[in-house]
Image: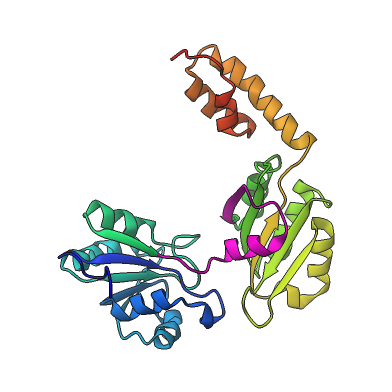
């Protein structure tokens, strides 16, 4: 196929795979999976049916968060020997809340080409169907498993004006919604997308309080894989954060260069760094 073996070194292909419906595997992804010598998969047993569906007879190798450093070295050796390798995750686009960035970095540092094969991504699929502002958004991945750390992370996002995208598991969806109601408020608009592209796909658009109540009342809505999208802060919450950021920036600016002052003020207040830096209004170093 085109581009698979244009040089002596192999190419690392980052291949997006279906998040549920196997028909979402693109023709190009199918072609790459058939052509490569090796497929690095998060779970080779999970990926076996997909590879069979694609007609791929490539060898497989497990690459996950616990072995990525050592496996990356082995895969780079294969790339340098001229083999083409595909990286896949259990579902969706690799590296999006999944392992892979160490491998990509190692491959690039070794001078190997890295090419994406775009396709499904649960976060983007959910956002496209949410009906919430999508021109600017923040992807937060999975929240911390421990309650205190989860609430601390959510607290840092209370005044974030962009739409917030979270992944969540069936084991913690209720607890996470409880914390979101407590910190974002029961009236904050949100969308819960469950089991996207699968048989029991559900997309619920409701204020967080009502969403929590519905999930608690229906055990079926507590099963599967979840994307939760929360509307960004509006009005007073966002304005007060920016005002505090500007106040802190003004104080720090007396002693620091604007870029450094903006970075620290953003970390302290939660206000967007770019907005604070844009306000500095002079050319002092």
> Where residue 172 appears, x then y in whole percent?
67, 64
Q: Is residue 136 magenta?
A: yes
Q: Nearer the viewer, residue 27 or 223?
A: 27
Q: Is residue 51 left or right of residue 228?
A: left
In this rendering, the answer to whether 148 lies above or below 81 is: above
Quadrant housing the C terminus: top left
As drawn, which residue projects farthest toward the front?
Answer: 2
In this rendering, the answer to whether 99 lies above or below 18 is: above
In this rendering, the answer to whether 196 lies above or below 233 is: below
> Where residue 121 appears, x then y in whole percent?
54, 65
Q: Nearer the viewer, residue 32 or 254?
A: 32
> Where residue 223 appears, x then y in whole percent?
68, 75
Taking the spot 52% from the left edge, 22% from the top edge, the residue there is 261
Q: Is residue 96 left or right of residue 79?
A: right
First to last magenta residue range: 117-141
Taking the spot 23% from the left edge, 58% from the top edge, the residue there is 112
Regarding residue 113, the answer to whether it shows in the image is yes
Q: Is residue 214 left or right of residue 229?
A: right
């Amino acid at each position: 196929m085109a581009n698979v073996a244009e040089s002596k070194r192999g190419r690392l292909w980052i291949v997006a795979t279906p998040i549920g419906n196997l028909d979402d595997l693109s023709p190009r992804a199918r072609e790459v999976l058939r052509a490569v010598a090796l497929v690095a998969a998060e779970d080779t047993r999970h990926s076996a049916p997909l590879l069979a569906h694609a007609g791929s007879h490539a060898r497989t190798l497990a690459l996950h968060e616990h072995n990525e450093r050592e496996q990356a070295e082995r895969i780079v050796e294969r790339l340098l020997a001229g083999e083409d390798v595909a990286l896949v995750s259990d579902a969706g686009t690799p590296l999006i809340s999944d392992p892979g960035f160490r491998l990509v970095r190692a491959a690039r540092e070794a001078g190997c080409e890295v090419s994406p094969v775009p396709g499904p991504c649960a976060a983007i699929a959910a956002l496209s169907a949410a009906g919430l502002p999508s021109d600017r958004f923040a992807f937060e991945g999975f929240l911390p498993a421990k309650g205190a750390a989860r609430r601390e992370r959510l607290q840092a996002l209370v005044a974030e004006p962009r739409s917030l995208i979270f992944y969540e598991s069936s084991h913690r969806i209720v607890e996470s919604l409880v914390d979101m109601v407590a910190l974002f408020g029961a009236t904050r608009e949100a969308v819960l997308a469950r089991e996207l592209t699968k048989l029991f796909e559900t997309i619920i658009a409701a204020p967080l309080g009502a969403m929590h109540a519905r999930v608690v009342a229906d055990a079926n809505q507590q099963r599967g894989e979840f994307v939760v999208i929360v509307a960004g802060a509006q009005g007073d919450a966002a304005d007060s954060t920016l005002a505090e950021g500007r106040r802190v920036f003004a104080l720090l600016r007396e002693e620091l260069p604007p870029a450094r002052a903006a970075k620290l003020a953003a970390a302290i207040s939660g206000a967007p760094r770019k907005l604070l830096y844009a306000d500095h209004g002079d050319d002092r170093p």
